[in-house]
């Protein structure tokens, strides 16, 4: 008899020895875990207000994306992955969510792993875009804006980059190794970009960064971001991101 739950334990990303977690996905796709917590995928920072605003593609591009079967399947897969995890999001469920026959899926993707890989790349591109927005603000303000971007969640955005990536990372032992490695590589690049921004904040504050200090702070920050997302999925009544972000950004970070 098949076990009623799928259990998995592991690390949030490769090379991290101190971020062990336990995750459980029920047959219905509900996630529980314990931490030892554009098109529709893309967002931009409004340079005037400092608020996160949806990027606005041209009318033709927007209409094309809205009704393009490939984009619809990507959107459906992203929603399911972030809600129920990779294992429970079958190809049939992904296709059915957009009223498409299962065979249509294979017109655009070779496998569920292929679709997930493209989604993962998009999410890291969104994180990079958030960090790369042109702004007249200080590095500290840029870091705060990036923190606010990471805190965006549905329904404000259909597929939230950090929520999707954290959910997939929590399933690391149960998903294809190539996909786990893709997330690990993307996380390494993202951590390096955050590290560079932290170094700039320190310089702006008149502090000479110690060797590897900004990299260690960035690794801690990224690990905590991932963990906060997983914890919020486990205990929706808590708002760990709301509590966590102000702690790191108030008074000038770091």
Image (spheres, rainbow, N blue to C red):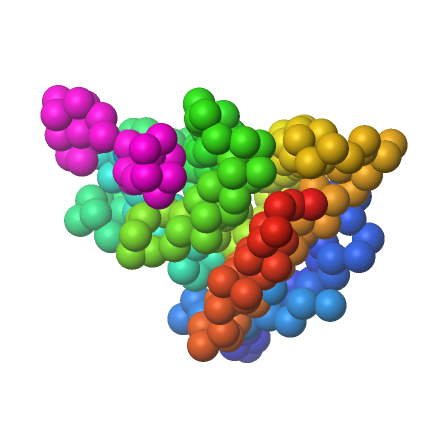
Magenta segment includes 56? yes
Apparent side of residue 157 relative to residue 221 in the rendered image (left or right): left
Q: Is residue 5 above or below residue 224?
A: below
**Which residue occupies the foreground of this view, 202 or 111?**
202
Apparent side of residue 108 relative to residue 82 in the rendered image (left or right): left
Apparent side of residue 2 relative to residue 210 in the rendered image (left or right): left
Task: List x then y, in percent, for residue 179.
Answer: 58, 39
Dividing the image into 4 quarters, which one contains the N terminus?
bottom right
Q: Residue at point 58% right, 38% down?
A: 140
**Which residue occupies the foreground of this view, 45 or 233?**
45
Q: Is residue 28 above or below residue 178?
A: below
Q: Is residue 192 above or below residue 90?
A: above
Task: List x then y, in percent, for residue 40.
Answer: 29, 40
Task: List x then y, in percent, for residue 234.
Answer: 52, 71
Apparent side of residue 146 relative to residue 52 in the rendered image (left or right): right
Dividing the image into 4 quarters, which one contains the C terminus?
top right
Badge count: 0
**Which residue occupies the foreground of this view, 110 or 182?**
182
Q: Is residue 123 visible?
A: yes
Q: Is residue 31 visible?
A: no
Question: Given the current orientation, which residue lies at the most extreme right position?
Answer: 211
Q: Is residue 122 above or below residue 170?
A: above
Stretch of the chain drawn in magenta: 40-67
Q: Residue at point 34% right, 56% down?
A: 154
Magenta segment includes 114? no
Task: List x then y, in percent, for residue 126.
Answer: 44, 33
Q: Residue at point 57% right, 32% down?
A: 139
**Which residue occupies the foreground of this view, 141 or 213?**
141
Q: Quadrant of residue 41?
A: top left
Q: Residue at point 55% right, 57% down?
A: 246
């Amino acid at each position: 008899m098949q076990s009623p739950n799928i259990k998995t334990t592991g690390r949030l990303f490769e090379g991290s020895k101190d971020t062990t977690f336990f995750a459980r996905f029920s047959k219905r796709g509900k996630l529980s875990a314990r931490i030892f917590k554009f098109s529709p995928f893309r967002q931009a920072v409004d340079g005037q207000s400092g608020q996160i605003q949806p990027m606005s593609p041209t009318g033709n591009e927007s209409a094309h994306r809205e009704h393009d079967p490939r984009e619809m399947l990507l959107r459906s897969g992203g929603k399911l992955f972030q809600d129920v995890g990779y294992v429970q999001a079958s190809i049939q469920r992904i296709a059915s969510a957009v009223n498409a026959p299962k065979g249509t899926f294979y017109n655009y993707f070779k496998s569920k792993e292929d679709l997930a890989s493209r989604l993962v790349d998009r999410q890291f591109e969104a994180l990079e875009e958030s960090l790369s927005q042109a702004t007249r603000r200080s590095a500290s303000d840029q870091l705060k804006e990036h923190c606010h971007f990471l805190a965006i969640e549905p329904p404000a955005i259909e597929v939230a980059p950090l929520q999707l990536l954290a959910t997939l990372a929590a399933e690391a032992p149960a998903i294809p190794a190539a996909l786990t490695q893709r997330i690990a590589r993307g996380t390494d690049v993202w951590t390096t970009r955050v590290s560079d921004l932290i170094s700039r904040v320190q310089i702006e504050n008149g502090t000479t960064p110690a060797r590897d200090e900004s990299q260690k702070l960035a690794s801690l920050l990224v690990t905590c971001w991932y963990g906060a997302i997983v914890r919020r999925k486990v205990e929706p009544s808590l708002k760990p991101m709301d509590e966590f972000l102000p702690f790191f950004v108030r008074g000038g970070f770091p």
